[in-house]
Image (spheres, rainbow, N blue to C red):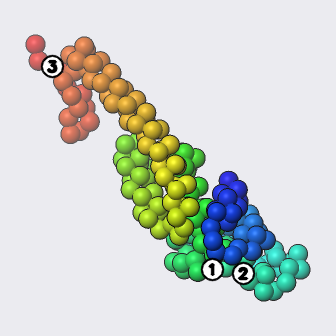
Amino acid sequence: MVTRTAIQISKNIEDPIDPFIVIAGSLLHDIGKTTSHFANFHGLFGGSIAEEFLEGLEIENSTSERICRVVVRHTPTSSIPPETPEEKVVYDADTLDRLGLMGLLRGFIGKEGSMQEILEKYMTSRQLDYDKLNYEYSRELGMMGAQELEGFSAVIQKRLDDRMSSIEGIFEKEGLIGIGSSKKLKKKKK
């Protein structure tokens, strides 16, 4: 998805783009996600893996360096912002991938807290991501993704609200008056 989006952005911006750098960089952008130990540094770690991989393919050094820069700079966790158009395109494409529905679903994996807490944190983080997009065309794509997410989030919120109402109805029917601070149910006095 990141590669497809990177190609789409490249076709719709005025900056001159080297398609080989964009495609290679977007295909290799997450190569550093080998273990959870490197998750926050996967751009930096991935740059070194990509360098070794491209050397094995005998890719020209200057081309290899440009691709590795894309890999390193595609994520905010590297703390090195994108500079070239190719770096910015892949950065935006990866960011848009996080903004979409699949990004939301991945956002739930391994997270602690209630669905509502996770959803609120996710939406706040994605707004910050959206604000960092480099190209107007990327922001247009992001708005379409945001609308999709808002619709999905509304469905999830309604289902959570319905579920809570159902649980409250059961508590009321069974004579339970609520959950105390110790998380034990208390019976209503008769």
Crowding at mark 1 (Cα within 10 Å: few <14, some 14-19, many 20+): some
Residue 185 against residue 123 in the figure, above or below: above
Write the residue at 74% across / 83% down.
65
Q: Quadrant of residue 34?
A: bottom right
Q: Are marks 2 and 1 in contact (CB under 8 Å)?
A: yes
Q: Position of residue 138 (x, y in %)?
A: 55, 61
Q: Most extreme residue toward the bottom, as rendered?
A: 62
Q: What is the CA distance from the residue labelled 2 to the residue labelled 1?
A: 9 Å
Of tags 2 and 3, the one toward the viewer is 2
Which label was assigned to residue 188? 3
Of tags 2 and 1, the one toward the viewer is 1
Write the residue at 55% across / 54% down.
141
Q: Amino acid at mark 3?
A: Lys
The residue nearer to you, when weighing 184 against 99, is 99
Q: Amino acid at mark 1?
A: Thr
Residue 136 against residue 164 in the figure, above or below: below
Q: Position of residue 56 (x, y in %)?
A: 87, 77
Write the residue at 75% across / 66% down.
23
Q: Amino acid at mark 2?
A: Arg
